[in-house]
Protein backbone atom coordinates (compact mmCIF):
# COMPACT_ATOMS: atom_id res chain seq x y z
CA UNK A 1 0.00 0.00 0.00
CA UNK A 2 1.40 3.42 -0.91
CA UNK A 3 2.05 5.74 1.99
CA UNK A 4 -0.72 8.20 2.79
CA UNK A 5 0.55 11.66 3.79
CA UNK A 6 0.58 12.52 7.49
CA UNK A 7 -1.57 15.58 6.79
CA UNK A 8 -4.66 15.93 4.61
CA UNK A 9 -5.04 17.24 2.01
CA UNK A 10 -1.49 16.39 0.93
CA UNK A 11 0.99 19.10 0.10
CA UNK A 12 2.26 19.17 -3.50
CA UNK A 13 5.47 17.40 -2.52
CA UNK A 14 3.43 14.56 -1.07
CA UNK A 15 2.69 13.12 -4.52
CA UNK A 16 -0.70 14.38 -5.66
CA UNK A 17 -3.17 12.01 -7.25
CA UNK A 18 -2.21 11.32 -10.86
CA UNK A 19 1.58 11.40 -10.34
CA UNK A 20 1.98 8.69 -7.70
CA UNK A 21 -1.23 7.08 -6.55
CA UNK A 22 -2.26 7.36 -2.92
CA UNK A 23 -4.10 4.24 -1.84
CA UNK A 24 -6.29 3.51 1.15
CA UNK A 25 -8.54 0.67 2.33
CA UNK A 26 -12.15 0.87 1.22
CA UNK A 27 -14.94 0.24 3.71
CA UNK A 28 -18.15 0.14 1.62
CA UNK A 29 -21.37 0.83 3.50
CA UNK A 30 -24.96 1.19 2.26
CA UNK A 31 -26.22 4.76 2.35
CA UNK A 32 -23.35 6.02 4.52
CA UNK A 33 -21.63 9.38 3.97
CA UNK A 34 -18.63 10.40 6.08
CA UNK A 35 -18.57 14.20 6.16
CA UNK A 36 -15.49 16.26 6.98
CA UNK A 37 -15.09 16.72 10.77
CA UNK A 38 -17.81 14.14 11.45
CA UNK A 39 -17.18 11.38 14.00
CA UNK A 40 -18.51 8.02 12.81
CA UNK A 41 -18.68 4.97 15.09
CA UNK A 42 -18.24 1.58 13.41
CA UNK A 43 -18.50 -2.02 14.60
CA UNK A 44 -15.95 -4.10 12.65
CA UNK A 45 -16.70 -7.83 12.72
CA UNK A 46 -16.12 -9.34 9.25
CA UNK A 47 -12.70 -11.04 8.87
CA UNK A 48 -11.72 -8.89 5.88
CA UNK A 49 -12.36 -5.67 7.78
CA UNK A 50 -10.69 -6.95 10.93
CA UNK A 51 -7.65 -7.51 8.73
CA UNK A 52 -8.04 -3.98 7.38
CA UNK A 53 -8.00 -2.45 10.86
CA UNK A 54 -5.02 -4.58 11.92
CA UNK A 55 -3.13 -3.43 8.82
CA UNK A 56 -3.66 0.30 9.35
CA UNK A 57 -3.39 0.67 13.12
CA UNK A 58 0.40 0.96 12.97
CA UNK A 59 0.23 3.51 10.16
CA UNK A 60 -1.80 6.60 9.36
CA UNK A 61 -5.06 4.84 10.27
CA UNK A 62 -6.89 6.11 7.20
CA UNK A 63 -10.01 4.46 5.74
CA UNK A 64 -12.23 5.50 2.85
CA UNK A 65 -15.95 5.14 3.55
CA UNK A 66 -17.52 4.36 0.19
CA UNK A 67 -21.26 4.67 -0.31
CA UNK A 68 -23.01 1.62 -1.75
CA UNK A 69 -25.92 2.80 -3.94
CA UNK A 70 -29.37 1.41 -3.26
CA UNK A 71 -29.37 -0.66 -6.45
CA UNK A 72 -26.15 -2.42 -5.35
CA UNK A 73 -27.18 -3.53 -1.87
CA UNK A 74 -28.08 -7.06 -2.95
CA UNK A 75 -24.40 -7.61 -3.82
CA UNK A 76 -23.02 -6.63 -0.40
CA UNK A 77 -22.10 -10.21 0.55
CA UNK A 78 -20.90 -11.17 -2.95
CA UNK A 79 -17.11 -11.56 -2.74
CA UNK A 80 -16.78 -12.51 -6.41
CA UNK A 81 -18.70 -9.47 -7.68
CA UNK A 82 -18.80 -6.90 -4.85
CA UNK A 83 -21.05 -3.84 -5.00
CA UNK A 84 -19.99 -0.69 -6.72
CA UNK A 85 -19.53 2.47 -4.67
CA UNK A 86 -20.12 6.10 -5.55
CA UNK A 87 -17.10 7.90 -7.07
CA UNK A 88 -16.91 10.55 -4.32
CA UNK A 89 -16.32 9.21 -0.82
CA UNK A 90 -15.24 10.29 2.64
CA UNK A 91 -11.70 9.78 3.92
CA UNK A 92 -11.49 9.18 7.65
CA UNK A 93 -8.82 8.61 10.25
CA UNK A 94 -9.19 6.33 13.25
CA UNK A 95 -9.44 8.66 16.23
CA UNK A 96 -10.06 5.86 18.74
CA UNK A 97 -10.29 2.11 18.64
CA UNK A 98 -11.16 -0.71 20.99
CA UNK A 99 -10.10 -4.28 20.34
CA UNK A 100 -12.77 -6.64 21.66
CA UNK A 101 -11.92 -10.04 23.20
CA UNK A 102 -13.27 -12.04 20.25
CA UNK A 103 -11.25 -10.12 17.64
CA UNK A 104 -13.88 -7.59 16.66
CA UNK A 105 -13.15 -3.86 16.77
CA UNK A 106 -15.07 -0.78 17.77
CA UNK A 107 -13.58 2.19 15.95
CA UNK A 108 -14.36 5.87 15.74
CA UNK A 109 -13.49 7.58 12.44
CA UNK A 110 -12.93 11.32 12.15
CA UNK A 111 -13.79 12.68 8.70
CA UNK A 112 -10.85 14.36 6.98
CA UNK A 113 -12.40 15.30 3.66
CA UNK A 114 -14.12 14.30 0.46
CA UNK A 115 -12.08 12.28 -1.99
CA UNK A 116 -12.47 11.21 -5.59
CA UNK A 117 -11.79 7.48 -5.71
CA UNK A 118 -10.85 4.82 -8.21
CA UNK A 119 -10.64 1.16 -7.20
CA UNK A 120 -7.29 -0.60 -7.60
CA UNK A 121 -6.32 -4.28 -7.30
CA UNK A 122 -5.84 -5.49 -3.74
CA UNK A 123 -3.82 -8.41 -2.45
CA UNK A 124 -5.59 -8.19 0.89
CA UNK A 125 -9.03 -9.50 1.84
CA UNK A 126 -10.46 -5.98 1.69
CA UNK A 127 -10.76 -3.65 -1.29
CA UNK A 128 -8.50 -0.64 -1.87
CA UNK A 129 -8.90 2.62 -3.76
CA UNK A 130 -6.71 5.32 -5.19
CA UNK A 131 -7.89 8.63 -3.80
CA UNK A 132 -7.38 12.37 -4.11
CA UNK A 133 -8.97 15.39 -2.44
CA UNK A 134 -12.11 16.52 -4.26
CA UNK A 135 -11.33 19.79 -6.03
CA UNK A 136 -13.81 22.26 -4.56
CA UNK A 137 -14.93 25.72 -5.68
CA UNK A 138 -15.13 28.08 -2.70
CA UNK A 139 -18.00 30.57 -2.55
CA UNK A 140 -17.33 34.19 -3.36
CA UNK A 141 -17.49 36.61 -0.41
CA UNK A 142 -20.89 37.78 -1.64
CA UNK A 143 -22.19 34.19 -1.89
CA UNK A 144 -20.87 33.38 1.59
CA UNK A 145 -22.62 36.43 3.07
CA UNK A 146 -25.95 35.62 1.42
CA UNK A 147 -25.81 31.99 2.54
CA UNK A 148 -24.68 32.53 6.13
CA UNK A 149 -27.98 33.48 7.74
CA UNK A 150 -30.15 30.76 6.15
CA UNK A 151 -27.47 28.13 6.78
CA UNK A 152 -27.09 29.10 10.44
CA UNK A 153 -30.85 29.00 10.90
CA UNK A 154 -31.09 25.58 9.31
CA UNK A 155 -28.15 24.21 11.32
CA UNK A 156 -29.63 25.43 14.59
CA UNK A 157 -33.00 23.91 13.68
CA UNK A 158 -31.36 20.53 13.06
CA UNK A 159 -28.75 20.82 15.84
CA UNK A 160 -30.50 22.57 18.75
CA UNK A 161 -27.56 21.62 20.98
CA UNK A 162 -25.28 23.96 19.01
CA UNK A 163 -26.25 27.17 20.75
CA UNK A 164 -23.21 29.35 20.06
CA UNK A 165 -21.61 28.68 16.71
CA UNK A 166 -18.49 30.82 16.22
CA UNK A 167 -18.85 33.75 13.84
CA UNK A 168 -16.09 32.50 11.55
CA UNK A 169 -17.47 29.04 10.70
CA UNK A 170 -16.81 28.48 6.97
CA UNK A 171 -19.72 27.98 4.59
CA UNK A 172 -18.56 24.45 3.80
CA UNK A 173 -18.62 23.48 7.48
CA UNK A 174 -22.12 24.88 7.97
CA UNK A 175 -23.32 22.85 5.00
CA UNK A 176 -21.74 19.66 6.33
CA UNK A 177 -23.26 20.19 9.78
CA UNK A 178 -26.66 20.65 8.21
CA UNK A 179 -26.36 17.57 6.00
CA UNK A 180 -25.47 15.30 8.91
CA UNK A 181 -29.04 15.70 10.23
CA UNK A 182 -31.00 15.87 6.98
CA UNK A 183 -33.39 12.90 6.47
CA UNK A 184 -32.91 12.75 2.71
CA UNK A 185 -33.13 9.85 0.28
CA UNK A 186 -29.74 8.47 -0.66
CA UNK A 187 -29.68 9.84 -4.24
CA UNK A 188 -30.47 13.34 -2.96
CA UNK A 189 -27.76 13.18 -0.30
CA UNK A 190 -25.30 11.76 -2.83
CA UNK A 191 -25.88 14.74 -5.11
CA UNK A 192 -25.16 17.15 -2.26
CA UNK A 193 -22.14 15.24 -0.98
CA UNK A 194 -20.45 15.06 -4.39
CA UNK A 195 -21.16 18.66 -5.46
CA UNK A 196 -17.77 20.43 -5.79
CA UNK A 197 -19.20 23.97 -5.87
CA UNK A 198 -19.70 24.88 -2.19
CA UNK A 199 -22.30 27.57 -2.91
CA UNK A 200 -24.28 25.13 -5.06
CA UNK A 201 -23.90 22.46 -2.36
CA UNK A 202 -25.23 24.89 0.21
CA UNK A 203 -28.31 25.69 -1.86
CA UNK A 204 -29.02 21.99 -2.43
CA UNK A 205 -28.75 21.40 1.32
CA UNK A 206 -31.06 24.32 2.10
CA UNK A 207 -33.58 23.01 -0.42
CA UNK A 208 -33.35 19.59 1.23
CA UNK A 209 -33.86 21.16 4.65
CA UNK A 210 -36.96 22.97 3.46
CA UNK A 211 -38.45 19.88 1.78
CA UNK A 212 -37.74 17.62 4.76
CA UNK A 213 -39.85 19.70 7.13
CA UNK A 214 -39.18 20.37 10.81
CA UNK A 215 -36.70 18.21 12.65
CA UNK A 216 -38.35 15.68 15.01
CA UNK A 217 -38.24 16.63 18.68
CA UNK A 218 -35.22 15.14 20.39
CA UNK A 219 -33.29 14.76 17.10
Image (spheres, rainbow, N blue to C red):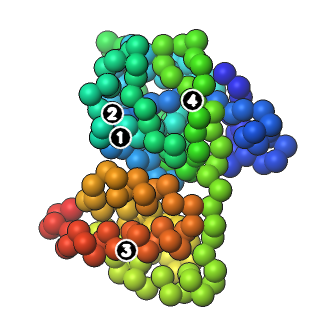
Label whose residue precedes the other's in the sequence (4 or 2): 2
Q: Disc 1 marks which residue?
A: 69
Q: Position of residue 177 (x, y in %)?
A: 41, 64
Q: Disc 4 marks which residue?
A: 119
Query: Looking at the image, which residue is at 43% across and 85% down?
Result: 149
Q: Is residue 134 left or right of residue 26?
A: right
- Of the 4 image quadrants, the one containing the N terminus is top right
Q: Which mark is residue 36?
A: none
Circles 2, 1 touching at the beta carbon (< 8 Å): yes
Residue 161 in sight in this render = no
Circles 2, 3 touching at the beta carbon (< 8 Å): no
Per the image, label 1 sits on a secondary structure element best described as loop
Label whose residue precedes the other's in the sequence (1 or 4): 1
Q: Which mark is residue 72?
A: 2
Q: Is residue 40 left or right of residue 200?
A: left
Q: CA distance from mark 4 to mark 2?
A: 16 Å
Q: Disc 3 marks which residue?
A: 206
Q: Residue furthest right?
A: 13
Categorize mark 2 by other alpha carbons within 10 Å: few (<14), some (14-19), many (20+). some
Pick the front one: 137 or 14: 137
Pick the front one: 82 or 21: 82
Q: CA distance from mark 2 to mark 3?
A: 28 Å
Q: Position of residue 97 (x, y in %)?
A: 44, 31
Amino acid sequence: MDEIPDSWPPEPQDAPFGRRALTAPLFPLPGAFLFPRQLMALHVFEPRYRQMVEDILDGAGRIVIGTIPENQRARMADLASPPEVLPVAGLGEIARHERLPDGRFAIWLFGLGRVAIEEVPSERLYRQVRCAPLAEVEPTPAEARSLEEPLRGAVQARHPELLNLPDDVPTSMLVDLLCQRLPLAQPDMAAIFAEPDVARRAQLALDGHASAGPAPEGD
